[in-house]
Image: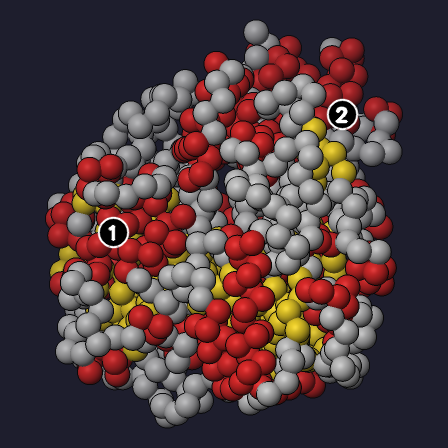
Amino acid sequence: MFRRAPVITGTGIICAAGCGVAAVWESVRANRSGLGPLTLFSSPRYANHLVGQVRENVDKFAGNVRGSRSDKLSWIAASEALAAAGLDAGFGKINPARVGVMLGATVGGMLCTEIFLTALLRENKHRFDPLRFHECAGAADLCAKKIGALGPVATLSTACSAGAMAILAAAELIEQGEADLMLAGAGDSLSRLTLNGFGSLLLLDPNGCRPFDARRTGISLGEGAAMLVIEAEETAIARGAKILARLAGWGASCDAFHATAPQAEGRGALAAMQRALERGQLQPGEIDFVSAHGTATPDNDAMESRALKKLFGGAVPPVASVKRFFGHTLAASGAIKAVLAVQSLREQAVPGTPGFEVADEKLSLEPVKEFCAQPVSRILSNSFGFGGNNVALVFERTDSKSSILNPQSAIKNQSFAVLGVGVVSAAGNSLAEIAATFRSGGAVTSSFAVPAISPTALAKVYAAGEFAAEQFIEPAKRRKLSRLQQLALVAARKSFSPKLAKTVAPEKICVAVGTGLGSLNDTAAFVENMILKDERAPRPSLFTSSVHNSLASQIAIELNFSGLNSTPIQRDISFETALWQGATELTSGRAELAVVGAADELNQYPLAAGIRWGWWHESSPEIRPFAGALKNRERPLPGEGGAVVTLGRAQYAASPLAFVSAIRIGRSENQNAETEARWILETLARDGIAVSELDLLLTGANGLAQPDDFYRAIPESLSKLAGKKIACGAYKHACGAHHSASAFGFVTAVGLVRGEIAPEFCTADKITLPGACRTVVLFTFSPTGTKGMCCIRA
Amino acid sequence: MESLIEELKTKIIAGFNLEGVTPADINPDEPIFGTGLELDSIDALELVAILESDYGIVITERAVADKAFASLRALAEFVAANRT
């Protein structure tokens, strides 16, 4: 099997325990907690809670950076990591196309959104600008732009394991040969949403968390960021980089059990740890230290203790939880722990567990109390997130055995069967309905109330209609799910034949369902309630829906899929990132089936902002790709919906709908058709597809001159190379403009190659192809430069 | 106490959006959670929010909630003793 060992050549960190690896390590050495009073914003309900707030002037440290506090924290940590790796002056001989960014996030710009909503709801002031920084993808986009990365760039949400999941994904990209160097990690700021959210779950300890202590009652919330420069060992050696540690193993799993509570026996946690060891070809006895998730909630620490006992038997190595040094920093947690693990390996010393005093007899596990020097060759670091999204990572010293096995050529000849598609959209909720909508010229818009700016304001949108959730989800379960969760779950159920569950074990089924913005309506309701009621009676079910990865984890819970579970949140390429994650699990054989997709919903606030910014107005035209009808500041009308597809390895392909290959994500600095034509060509070639096979390039064209002219020029370039006419297609006239539109595009492509949708209804100038449309490339380019593609064939 | 029990039943059915459940279906002496109503730990926390918004009772520790939610009758007694 092909393997390129990922090594770590730079680390950076900022958190309540200090700014910079040296400062944080000094706090760790002194066993000194960085928890303190909350001064970042006022919170009547939690004013007396100790929190892990970063005390440095984040704006100043971040320098000339525009973005949310999370974005700035991320960039501060990234700058340090890049400098430590000797890359602060640029990448030298490293090809930027081989450099990527993979980050985790949960909070993103929520702090900015809270400022906007407070001004709106309290003072009726329409200051929409902070909403520009709402999205969790901000930090990855910022870092990628700053360093000029032109390789894979994405953001993943798996709640409190997202930082570790990002490191895992970066390691996959290195191992696959898709990138030589990745910036990986996560940053999350404090926010009122998370404080009130964890408060509503009764999971906060006002006096500071006490991991593994008999008296523990909950977490302390914190903020911060940590970044790692991860490189392929051979290229790191070639450029003379100092190797700090090696990433020896990684594993992910899903409890498939509950939205917030861990499975009590630690079934999923154990599976993630076992997979990490298997991946590194390691035995439990080769682990010298465990950096526990150790949040100090009664359930987590009990579950984690049980899982560790099961893994290590009677010989559990020293265990510590570092949570009281800086609080639970959510997505950043796994990344901060990774940086500290690297530091432990270098310093040959392990952190203690501040906050722990009284052993809990029920746990039969006593953590390391104080910092101590000890020989340490390998560290297992655990991260567990809401929805049972578990990730375990193993870091090892560089003088230990190398895990490079049989280096050979990387990605090629991957092709997966599309076993089912499920869709909910303005164009309809099945392939047949969508085909009919295309024939009629596109979907019909409807009105959508925007009370935030006017009692009478009605916007035109491409709304998803009723999707008969009651036929797919039991009432007892449905009442607790947000509309978007229901929408994604319905699409997943439609895509997944129950027969498959009888032939494939649950742990061999992974779920990657992305979203640009998540369950916006429940998130908004939680924050509105918080602002208007002065934080009284926060609603836990709205909070759990607000967590992005509740989309993928709910699917896993309902359908009992316990393989990797992730929710990519990378704007317009959330779907493509999900597709890449699913394909990665299939290629490696860790999964036999991958349930991948993306979903987004309409909400009044982004609409209100768009109306204020002049994007949409009463006479906004409906989307007509390539027609160039939109002017000046206008944008294509927004839509919503989702699509989920079940992919399988060839042996499940008794009667597949289609095949998908050439799955890739990347980034460009600007819109250049020649560059993208070459990228598409290269990606097709490595999966053995000749450009002459291509019939149609299906794009996100939306009626704006840019990107439509750019999109249209790509197949023109490809046509010259292919010596035949390749058509340019579009689908947003059927589903509206939204972050998950390309998931709808995938279903459209399946319809095209199956002959159920005629190309003339998707193409510029209503082109009729000379023959059947058998090979379609779906290409998506997000306004921030991230891009994704895949090739769908009959 | 009986009228408070009936009031709480109504609030639980409405607050949890329990389709097809009537007050008569809820036995006031059975545990509220983990029984036939299919209510789970998130519902228990939703009930904490309802107690705060409707009766001014602020619960911050899970142990307090667990005890108060032993049965609907126990809950009614807890509400009667702590409402503000």
Instruction: Provide residue A628's location: percent of width, then percent of height.
Output: 62, 52
Left of B33 or right of it: where is A246?
left
Question: Label 1 belongs to which residue?
Answer: A77
Image quadrant holding the N terminus of chain A, namely bottom left
Amino acid type for the residue under numbered disc 1: Ala
Question: Label 2 belongs to which residue?
Answer: B14
What chain does badge 2 belong to? B
Which quarter of the figure has residue B83? Answer: top right
Instruction: Provide residue A569's location: percent of width, then percent of height.
Output: 51, 53
Instruction: Provide residue A560's location: percent of width, then percent of height.
Output: 67, 61
Identified at 76% across, 25% down, the residue is B14
Identified at 69% across, 86% down, the residue is A651
| Proximity of marks 2 and 1: CB atoms separated by less than 8 Å | no
Residue A48 in sight here: yes
Q: In this view, does A561 lie above or below A36?
A: below
Q: How crowded is mark 2: few (under 14 residues within 10 Å), some or many (20 or more)?
A: few
Q: In this view, does A447 lie above or below A312?
A: above
Residue A535 in sight here: no
